[in-house]
Amino acid sequence: DAVAQLAVAGVALHPDWLVEGRDAADLRGSEPPARPRWSVTGRAVLTADGEPLPGGLAPARRVPPTSADHAGIPTWPTAGQPVALGQHTALGQHAAGGQPVGPGQLATAGRAAGEPTRETLVGHFLTTARDMLAAQRDVLLSYLGAPTTPTVPVAVGVGAAAPAAVQPVVPVTGPPAGTVSAASDGVTSGGDGRPDAADGLRDVGDVVPGAGTGGGRAAVDVGAVVLDLIAGNTGYPTEMIEPDLDLETDLSVNSIKRTEIAGLLTQRLNLTDALGPRAVEELSRLRTVRTITTWLTERTAGSGPATPATPSAPSTFPAPPTATAPPTATAPPTATAPPTATAPPTATAPVTLVGPGEPGARGGGRAPTRFVLTTVPAPLIAGTADLTGTADLTGTIDLTGTAWTVFGDVTAHDVADPVAGRLADLGATVTARTAAELAEAPPQRLDGLVYLCGWGRAEGEPELPETFAAIRAALQAGPRWVLAVSALAAADPAGSTGPGPALPTERAAGLRGLFRTLAREYPDRLVRLVELDDAASAADILAAELGRSTATGAVAVHRGGTRHGEQLTAMPVGPLAAAGAGPAADGAAEAEALGLDRDAVILLVGGARGITAGFTTLLAGAARCRLELAGRTAPPAAEDPRTAGIADRAGLIQAVRELGHRTPGEARRAVAAILARREIAATLADVAARGGQARYRQLDVLDADAVAQAVKQVFARHGRLDGVVYSAGVIEDALVADKDPQSFRRVFDTKVAGARALLAALAELPVQPRFLTFFGSIAGVLGNRGQGDYAAANDALETLGAAWARRRDTRTITVHWGPWAPSAAHPGMVDPGLEAEFARRGVDLIDPDEGHLCLLRELAWGPRDAHAVVYSASGW
Ligand SMILES: NC(=O)c1ccc[n+]([C@@H]2O[C@H](COP(=O)([O-])OP(=O)(O)OC[C@H]3O[C@@H](n4cnc5c(N)ncnc54)[C@H](OP(=O)(O)O)[C@@H]3O)[C@@H](O)[C@H]2O)c1
């Protein structure tokens, strides 16, 4: 540099000596080197002419304003001046007249001279992003030796491929008489005027909010909309859904799904505002297409431009053969006003799970975060949500004139007598009943209910599902206090409950899940499960709990003289369990850590279908071990050629009807059986392709003898059993108020009676498996509207598993899953309707691959004494 500066300054220099004796050449007489063909900078690859490579990524350039952007205003910014991206954020900050405007007004008011619109900028951003991805794809393809396809530039802009949110809404006015109106783009019709075949609940997002409050309405036949929505949500062809079929019994549309459909109907018909929030509830109680159509048609009479010409018209259905009046919606039972007390509401705000650094979304779901439910001190606060203003921490509350029922273990006198006595002392009229008596003859009037559970004996069969009928019957009498008092399980033979987690007795298994759900379904009542380690203090504690609501949920644990609430806490198990042992993510390292090799034997009950099938195939590839699968479905066999080639559900329904399954129920069952067997066959094929060995057997876990037999046979065949995964489960969702006790039993027993049969069978083996895993659900941990039975069942699994682990010193863990994203091969319980509902609620779903790996890592590297854990991709 110094020599060069001297030369430039005119100093006579003789630099030859600098290169003397070195390997140097004098270039003065030589040819200049060829210009480079490419120059590569940190930002772009350019040709010798400084142009981007043909088909390559174009460097950033200034966005020229279009004629649409100008709107008569010249130049933005000063020609030739580069624009930094940060400047865009300042756009629109000064409206005409110098008034500042917010960012939301960017595209409309106050655009400075020649500024591109927001849509134009977004369009350019999308084009560039797309080009960038295409370039990356080409690099990868070239690297992998595949031919690349040239990138064809695609203009992205408003009106072409712009995001749906900026699509203009074109109003259509003037509905003909006899129709009601819908948001103009609420119904996405195909050429035949029907919604797309599979739209169903998924069309929630298509409805333009508030579009109907203005004039944007188009004529819609109510009956056709009702029919289409039900068809879209059930998979039945519209012609099969006769107007008077019962949605629940004939078409298996349960009350939860009816509520979803009712919500969609009011949205589609743009009636949400006109009818108010109670309309959906009322509508969801109607059970035929005809009554729903009539109800909607009548309600829309006189609602602005949507008014049909006559209230009774129109219907797409012929009149029923016999003129039966459509059932009118019945109002929910109303509570008799109490003379002296009002119940405080129970806090049931949606639960947001906050975890550290959630991994990003992938495919149809996200990687889940690991949580553990712990108990934290949660003292009652004097005066909080006080019933009468007289309650205090000693339990002074005036219950004069209120009617109470104490039921359950009423012969456990050490608890029942003081509890009933204390309620009476506070002024209540108290009746003691057994569960059977209460179920058969619930009182006409009931202000408070106390269920004494698990006091007679701690071990043995859970009191649920038997006592559910009594709880439901009592709820129908409208009590405003709904309490259960149960005993905590002893952690050791001496009867101590601590240290370690506070667990219910096996008799009370499932009560936590049920009460968490009741608190969600009855938010205006005090719903609480009070668990105690000291029977002698039951009456005092109950009286203290009566008057107060806390934000710590429906379960109160009194242990060692301290009151606790529950808290779900993100608790990663360390880097290995969080991310695995290497980038392969094939589970091999985890399987090895778990001690699984080719000789290992794993029994997976429910392992051939749904979310467990993916875990089965992961094990097959990772450990190549021997897999014993079981489920109710008959083993796969050659399929009838008349259905074999049909993939879609509607086509299958049509085909099985032609095969003689005429009624909707028969057709639905026949199609479900075909799909189940195909799914099992696919799982077995996948296992084989990954080098594993699987055998499938038909087994109903409700048959305890068959379960014992199956476990015995598996052990006898292989001489070992290394691990067991129990994921059998069914759902039959309905609100507790509508829940048939037999249905509650089916859902509960599939999990709980099946698991108890499994544990009894394992107890007979000479060597215990190294691990046992129950598939539970987040619904059991947090409760879920419409899933009282399912929540109870999953919660009960945890209690049974923990008791088993304590008794047998065997590693047993219940994994409570959040909802999973359905995969095409193994959809599991999350059907399209449920998936749409989760999307509406903003609940993220678990990515199946990530979920399976999480389970394997939990088993490989998670703490051995963890009895339950929650994996969820989202809040609840
Ligand atoms: N999918 C989710 O988002 C999710 C979320 C949380 C928890 N879970 C839990 O994960 C487990 C699997 O659910 P999934 O979504 O995969 O549902 P799924 O596809 O319906 O699988 C349920 C499995 O249980 C079996 N099963 C049901 N009743 C049975 C019985 N009486 N005897 C023997 N096997 C029986 C089924 O086999 P057959 O049909 O052949 O009987 C099937 O293999 C369930 O326990 C569920 O509670 C799932």
Image (cartoon, rainbow, N blue to C red):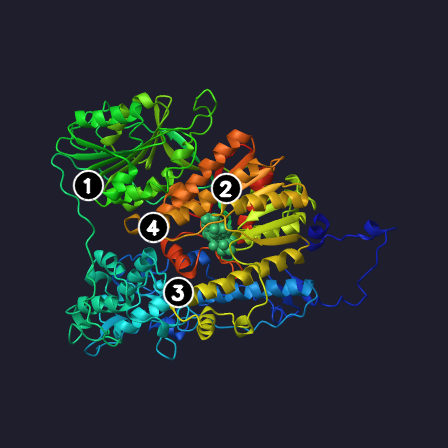
Name the amino acid, label 3: Gly
Q: Is residue 216 visible?
A: no
Q: Considering only order in the chain, which callout, 2 or 1, is on the residue closer to the N terminus?
A: 1
Task: Give the image location of residue 819, x and y in percent.
Answer: 45, 51
- Disc 1 target residue: 443
Nearer the observer, 654 or 24: 654
**Regarding mark 3 in the picture, which secondary structure is present there?**
helix
- Disc 4 target residue: 786
- Residue drawn at (63%, 41%) of the image: 721
Question: How far is mark 2 from mark 3, CA to CA?
Answer: 30 Å
- Look at the numbered discs 3 and 4 and tell me whether their residues touch, using CB distance below 8 Å: no
**Regarding mark 4 in the picture, which secondary structure is present there?**
loop
- Disc 3 target residue: 665
Q: Considering only order in the chain, which callout, 1 or 3, is on the residue closer to the N terminus?
A: 1
Where is 790 relative to 94, above or below? above
Nearer the observer, 189 or 16: 189
- Crowd rating for badge 1 (residues with CA inside 10 Å; few <14, some 14–19, many 20+): some
- Look at the numbered discs 2 and 4 and tell me whether their residues touch, using CB distance below 8 Å: no
**Regarding mark 2 in the picture, which secondary structure is present there?**
helix
Q: Considering only order in the chain, which callout, 3 or 2, is on the residue closer to the N terminus?
A: 3
**Regarding mark 1 in the picture, which secondary structure is present there?**
loop
Name the amino acid, label 1: Pro
- Residue drawn at (33%, 29%) of the image: 378
Q: Considering only order in the chain, which callout, 4 or 3, is on the residue closer to the N terminus?
A: 3
Q: Is mark 2 within 8 Å of ligand 1?
A: no
The disc placed on residue 110 is none
- Disc 2 target residue: 757
User: Which dot, 3 or 4, sits closer to the camera?
Assistant: 3
